[in-house]
Amino acid sequence: ADVAGLLAWLRERGPRWARILQSDAVKVTVNKSFADPGTQVRDGDEVAIVSVGI
């Protein structure tokens, strides 16, 4: 899976998640480095979602 897929999956949890995880409102880090939507996420990776505009 990649970052975009992870965010899409989380948004499917409901409208509140979809609102919170608006693409322009968050940045994602993978293993403590900011990641692009196409960055792969593998088992054991550390993922953080950072709010930048809510």
Image (spheres, grey):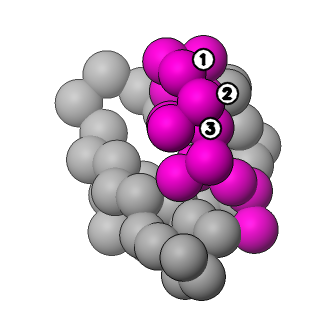
Does 9 sit above or below residue 47? Answer: above
* Residue at the disc numbered 1: 12
Does 18 sit above or below residue 47? Answer: above
Does 40 sit above or below residue 23? Answer: above
Where on the picture, by quarter, is residue 4?
top right
**What span is in magenta?**
10-24
- The x and y percentages for residue 47 are 34, 48
Of the residues tagged 2 and 3, which is closer to the observer? 3
Q: Which mark is residue 41?
A: none
Q: Quadrant of the C terminus?
A: bottom right
Tag 2–tag 1 contact (CB < 8 Å): yes
Q: Residue at x 69, y 54 (%)?
A: 22
The residues bearing labels 2 and 1 have C-alpha atoms spaced at a distance of 6 Å
Q: Of residues 20 and 26, which is closer to you in this image?
A: 20
The residues bearing labels 2 and 3 have C-alpha atoms spaced at a distance of 8 Å
- Of labels 1 and 3, earlier in sequence is 1
Q: Residue at x 26, y 47 (%)?
A: 46
- Of labels 2 and 3, earlier in sequence is 2
Residue type, label 2:
Ala
Where on the picture, by quarter, is residue 1?
top right
Q: Is there any visible trace of residue 2 in the rendered image?
A: no
Q: Is residue 21 magenta?
A: yes
The residues bearing labels 1 and 3 have C-alpha atoms spaced at a distance of 7 Å
* Residue at the disc numbered 3: 18
